[in-house]
Image (cartoon, helix red, strand yellow):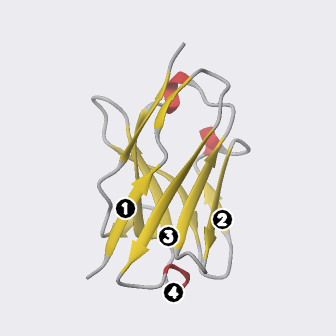
Amino acid sequence: EVQLVESGGGLVQPGGSLKLSCAASGFTISSSPMTWLRQAPGKGLEWVSTLYRVGNTYYLESVQGRFFISRDDAKNTLYLDMNSLKPEDTAVYYCAMGQFTSTSNRGQGTQVTVSS
């Protein structure tokens, strides 16, 4: 059974950093494109970043240069390093199999709140 479990969210001040983790089981993350999505309060699901099997990365324009997606194949875990966080980054963050908005097996999410 495919399972994705996100962690690492929390409350951070504007300008701060957080590193999200997504532990995978039931499949090997290096065998699939992997994606981070987010949903802000009262808004729809938004694509954030995709990591392809060969290492190509893509980012939402508003997070380009601040967020970095990576994976640890030995730990079968996907990461999202988030820097220079802004209040508008506040959302529940999800990891999922697939690329861009074509995803499946989304995890339960982890809350990120950026506030002073």
Q: Earlier in the sequence, mark 4 or mark 1?
A: 1
Residue assigned mark 4: 31
Would you call the spot at circle 4 few (<14 residues within 10 Å), some (14-19), or many (20 or more)? few
Disc 4, disc 3: CB below 8 Å? no
Q: Position of residue 64 (x, y in %)?
A: 68, 45
Observer-side mark, 4 or 2, equals 4
Name the side, left or right, on which 95 lies relative to 15: left
Q: Earlier in the sequence, mark 1 or mark 3?
A: 1
- Residue 101 shows which numbered tag? none
- Residue 98 lies, with reference to residue 13, above or below; the image says below
Residue assigned mark 2: 57
Observer-side mark, 4 or 1, equals 1
Tell me where residue 101 sits by quadrant.
Answer: bottom left
Give the amino acid type for the residue marked by disc 1 in the picture. Val
Name the side, left or right, on which 8 lies relative to 80: left
SS at mark 2 in the image? strand
Residue assigned mark 1: 5
Instruction: Name the residue furthest right.
Output: 65
Residue at 38% over, 68% down: 102
Q: Earlier in the sequence, mark 1 or mark 2?
A: 1
Q: Earlier in the sequence, mark 4 or mark 2?
A: 4
Would you call the spot at circle 2 few (<14 residues within 10 Å), some (14-19), or many (20 or more)? some
Disc 1, disc 3: CB below 8 Å? no
Q: Position of residue 56 (x, y in %)?
A: 68, 71
Tell me where residue 44 sits by quadrant.
Answer: top left
Residue assigned mark 3: 34
